[in-house]
Image: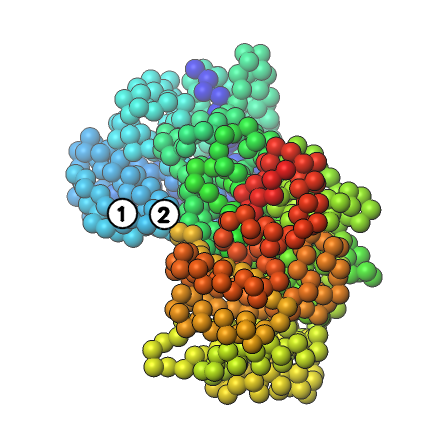
Amino acid sequence: MDYAHPLRFGAHVVARTPQEAAERARLAEELGLDLVTVSGEETDTWTLLSWVAGRTGRIGLAPHLLDAAEWAPAVLGRAAAGLDLLAGGRLELGLGDGAGRWEASGVRPLPPEQAATALGEAIGIIRGVWGSDTRLPLRAEGEHYRIAGAERGPAPAHNIPVWTGGTRPDPAIAAGADGWLTTSGGLAADQAVIDEAAVRAGRDPREIRRLVTVAPRAAAPEWTGELVAMALEHGAGTFLVEDADEAALRRFAQEVVPAVRQAVAAARAARGVTEAAVPSSLVRAHRHPGIDYEAVPAHLTTIEPGDAGYARVRSTYMRGGSPGLVLRPGTPAEVADALAFARGQQVPLAVRSGGHGISGRSTNHGGIVIDVSRLNAIEVLDKETRRVRIGPGARWSDVAGALAPHGWALSSGDYGGVGVGGLATAGGVGWLVREHGLTLDRLRAVDLVLADGSLVRADDTRNAELFWAVRGAGGNFGIVTSFEFEVDEVGEVGFAQFVMDASDTAGFLRRWGAAIEAAPRDVSGQLIIGRPRPGQPVIAQVMLVVDADDAETVLDRLRPIAAVAPLLDHTIQILPYSAIMHVPPGGHDGQGDPVARSALADHLTADLAAAATRLIMSGETYFFQIRTVGGAVSDVPADATAYAGRSANFQLVAFGPSRARLDAIWDRMRPHFSGIYLNFETDLRPERLDDAFPGETLRRLRELKRRYDPANVFRDNFNITP
């Protein structure tokens, strides 16, 4: 029986010394083998495996039937996840019940049948530790192990395959073991035993990979024939040459492996057998209805709800989600393939770059997410014109770090953890905005995948109307796979943080707005006011960037703004722009849905300041922010891009606990606004499109939508209907 598993080849290293283990593993890696399993004689196997992981970079790693009885299962689960993360997702876990060595290790021996049961329980606990997609504590009530509310995690870097061996497979296979290790002599007899155990556990026997240790042979043809027969007749998918010296290992890798691959591929082709791994029942049990998982193109990287990495991709910065499938394309062609697949499924579709967005619905429940975070390259195209190409999945922290050595920067948002794609297609209001404009104002060309799967380029001369639409409403028209920007010369900058007494809240807002409008364009920034505390003055936090590295210039720019209210505390630094934007890598774990309202205002008038004060004092916002705009943003004609709010000097946003109560107050403030910046808006009422895209702009966008996305594929973020 051929189970059509993709063939894998490796080496079982029985190490006398750590140096020998590392050398043999590196040789196996250099020879192109897939897996090395390690057994220690004088060195603890797990310690030895960690050493080998640090001395290799690609090859898969596994302990060769680690005695599970010597470990507390939860501890082993965390250790395995940690090593997998450190090794870049290369770990497999080979476990044995260790019955023959328990007594020597000081562990109470169990009869073989009970030892097998204990191993099955241990596997269940280990997988429970890895299941960090749930926040519920881990509990287990077994015959041999009891867990009363242990914390889960960390999640490993990938789905760690767990395989075992012995004569009693039922408990391990029932617990979700992925593979069974046997010898070439025992494979035929084990085949039926493993299949029957899988059926009793309600699993497809094809899920269980057969790993076989084989002794070195002097003659390659004899060796080849033996392995081909085991693959085609007995379902073997992984072959581990046992304790081979260097010559035998080279013969295995250079002569036997290619011959076996060729012979098996030819036989499968003749039989019409397609090579494929069968997902485990544990993964399939978490699948969502409405998605044809079997039809996903095999070359696409996927994460399903049952996968170990699901917890890292299910939610965004501010939103909790439970998508049925996350597709992670790594090339523009793969983006097109992912989109083609998603279009054929009757479930919601979301597109994600960094997953930080407030308005952006880059996750969903039961649908598909196309996550372009792997498209994160940053490339200098032309130093003379400061032209750079940036992938949508890059974070602004990474962009700032990559441009800093050239003395460059790109006007972007104010937080480095934001992804490029969502921000650059909507606006981009940040620390350099008054001097250098919106992020999209520095955009010179885009490559994107349209709704029909075609890959096109858009700039001022090619697909110029599409280029116009992408700059402000890009999420409605396609998936951008690369941006080309003209960046600016920016060195060190002044960065100030003021804590100010805003007890006279309306007066403070009005004076601060006037000071900002009077400031030179090299000053940009924001203020934040939280929910007032009873009996305490209203406090405002002001953060400003001055695009200058001369201390006197920085101070001259800041003094008028510092004078608008009593200064309670302050810091002023001169530092690289990249230092302001730096954010360590990290995932998102949002919950629920944010409630936020956004607006643009031409000026902070007395009436607007009074209305904002009433909002702040109502307690219905716990975070009220005003960002500077104007300056270079207003130099661009309102019809030059789909982003139309060019007259505004300020962008306002308020977060609140209650949508209804915040909306009631914010709607009364609407007469003071001149537009809206959608990236901070969560209100989905149709009027928001009119606020963002006034009159002729929205008419033009609808016409382009009919041309480029008549089926309304891209509709999950402030949808412009055709």
Residue at the top extreme, as displayed: 271
> How far across and down, in percent of the image, does residue 443 sit?
73, 55
Occupied quadrant, residue 176: top left
Q: Residue at x 34, y 81 (%)?
A: 535
Where is 590 relative to 314, above or below? below
Where is 248 relative to 140, above or below? above
Image quarter in which the C terminus is found: top right
Residue at label 1?
138
Q: Which residue is drawn at 62% across and 71% down?
A: 603
Label 2: few (<14), some or many (≥20) within 10 Å? Answer: many
The one nearer the camera, 323 or 391, is: 323
Q: In this view, does 386 lie to the left or right of 364?
A: right
The one nearer the camera, 572 or 90, is: 572
Q: Which residue is drawn at 29% across and 48% down?
A: 136
Amino acid type, label 2 = Ser
Occupied quadrant, residue 289: top left
Image quarter in which the N terminus is found: top left
Amino acid type, label 1 = Leu
Q: Is residue 684 left or right of residue 183?
A: right
> How far across and down, in percent of the image, does residue 209 sit?
41, 27
Helix, strand or loop under label 2: loop
> How far across and down, in percent of the image, does residue 68 sit?
29, 42
Occupied quadrant, residue 108: top left
Label 1: few (<14), some or many (≥20) within 10 Å? Answer: some
Whether residue 337 is visible to the viewer of this picture, yes or no, is no
Helix, strand or loop under label 1: strand
Q: Which of marks 2 and 1 is nearer the N terminus?
A: 2
Q: Do the residues labelled 2 and 1 touch (CB within 8 Å)?
A: no
CA gap between label 2 and label 1 equals 10 Å
Q: Residue at x 60, y 66 (%)?
A: 601
Residue at label 2?
132
